[in-house]
Amino acid sequence: MTDNDIRRVSLDALRAMDEAGDLRRPADAPDGEDLGEDFWKGAVLHPPRTRNSVSITLSPAAMEFFEREGPDPAEAIRGVLEAYAAEHSNS
């Protein structure tokens, strides 16, 4: 891997790379402390956040409205849709 090589890998793949000697680390890097079993008892693994992608067609007036809301119209649209869904999820 080069200094500019950034990629996502699973923990298993990272362990395999480490075992194969494919990970570089300074020779004087200290080993991490053993946190012990008690440390990990309350640990919770959170699944990765995901988003669904959709394509919509907006009228020029609607698009102009969201463009006026800020630099990221898609974020403004997501906010409106999330607020609508939250308001109507209990009905």
Image: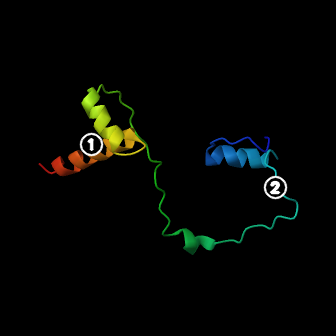
For the residue pair 8 and 56, the one nearer the viewer reads as 56
- Quadrant of res 10: top right
In the image, residue 44 sits, relative to residue 5, either above or below, namely: below
Foreground mark, 1 or 2, reads 1
Element assignment for label 2? loop
Horizontal and vertical percent for residue 67? 35, 38
Horizontal and vertical percent for residue 18? 76, 49
Quarter holding the N terminus is top right
For the residue pair 34 and 81, the one nearer the viewer reads as 81
Q: CA distance from mark 1 to mark 2?
A: 46 Å
What residue is rendered at 36% in x and 30% in y?
Answer: 54
Element assignment for label 1? helix
Residue that numbered label 1 is attached to: 81
Residue 4 appears left or right of 68: right
- Quadrant of res 53: top left
Q: Residue furthest right?
A: 27
Residue 69 appears left or right of 48: left
Q: Which amino acid type is shown beneath numbered disc 1?
A: Leu
Residue 40 appears left or right of 67: right
What residue is rendered at 30% in x and 25% in y?
Answer: 57
The number of numbered discs placed on residues in the rendered structure image is 2
For the residue pair 39 and 24, the one nearer the viewer reads as 24
Horizontal and vertical percent for residue 58? 28, 28
Residue that numbered label 2 is attached to: 25
What residue is rendered at 26% in x and 33% in y?
Answer: 62
Residue 15 appears left or right of 85: right
Q: Which amino acid type is shown beneath numbered disc 2?
A: Arg
For the residue pair 71 and 50, the one nearer the viewer reads as 71
